[in-house]
Image (tube, helix red, strand yellow):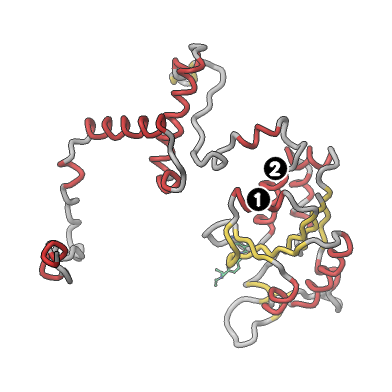
Amino acid sequence: MRIVVLSIFPQMFPSFFAHGMVRLACERGLLDPEVIDPRAFAPGPHRTTDDRPYGGGSGMVMKPEPLAAALRRARGLAPGAAAILLSAQGLPLTQERAAALSRREALILVCGRYEGVDDRLCGEEIAEEISIGDYVLSGGEVAAMVVIDAVVRLLPGVLGSPTSAAGDSFVDGLLEYPHYTRPAVFEGRAVPEVLKSGDHRRIARWRKEASLWRTLAHRPELLRGRPLDEEERAILRSMQTTLEEILPPEIPREPLPRRKGAIDRRRKPAQRKFSLTDGEAAE
Ligand code: 9D3
């Protein structure tokens, strides 16, 4: 896969391409990366790539001409590739989107800096915009590395076996179970006995329970978006039973004590638009 990155900080990339699976992919000829600096296409002694925003306001905007010229060069290096802008306004990166990108011949990744890129470039030259999540970065470079990392490990021949990628979290919709290696006791904490038992059925069951428990605790919304088989339903039911044993039902129903001086935002019964029995009364 050809990947051309456009960035005014090209020196952020060499060490990224020189490590781990990304490096392996390059060595195996499965990834052919190139970084282009739009500054090289900017005129004048200062090679300025930013300017003040029309309409005023704080921050600077990336000028369209150097980026457009760099894009033209990128299209020469990666004919037919879609240009993707890394942007906080983009569609969220998911495992599914990473998999779709990994099936393309080539990618052009455009990294913005400053407050953003002149919107006329986004409209005409950019096919897609991708965000890596709802937090503020200072530019697209780290996001481009995230996209490349997620995509490259899905290229056929990068991972040891094609099934390694299929076992990942998100691929089967659950978080992963905990991992352990030697020593058997580390700082007084032992590895769960079952993992040393050699009983592969019990190990598989323990891992399934741990996956479900973690998913329920950290990412319950993932369980809603995924069909559950009978074993998984049984495990979740037993967890509910366990929780009810630990927490008698009246405890979570008790309202939390009010902080001194806090404004009481609890809606009083008189403020309700409808009484709770309206539905029945209408029948
Ligand atoms: C006034 C609001 N701006 C700064 C607080 C908005 C803003 C401008 C530029 C927010 C982020 C950025 C730079 N971000 C990216 O280039 C970026 C990004 C991100 O910030 N979050 C998640 N994914 C991405 S991909 C590129």
Query: Are dots 2 and 1 in contact, CB under 8 Å?
Result: yes
Q: From the image, tell me which residue sits under label 2.
A: 154
Q: From the image, tell me which residue sits under label 1.
A: 98
In the rendered image, the vertical position of residue 44 relative to residue 7, given as above or below = below
Q: Earlier in the sequence, mark 2 or mark 1?
A: 1
> Splitting the image into four quadrants, where does ligand 1 fall?
bottom right
Q: Which residue is at the front of the view, 237 or 60?
A: 237
Tell which residue pokes out farthest to the right in this image.
Answer: 76
Q: Residue at x 54, y 42 (%)?
A: 170
- Residue 143, percent from left and from top: 65, 56
Amino acid at circle 2: Leu
Q: Quadrant of residue 107?
A: bottom right
Q: Quadrant of residue 28?
A: top right
Amino acid at circle 1: Ala
Q: Which residue is at the front of the view, 97 or 268?
A: 97
Assign a secondary structure to mark 2. Answer: loop
Tell which residue pokes out farthest to the front in this image.
Answer: 283
Q: Residue at x 59, y 37 (%)?
A: 168
Q: Residue at x 69, y 46 (%)?
A: 149
Assign a secondary structure to mark 1. Answer: helix
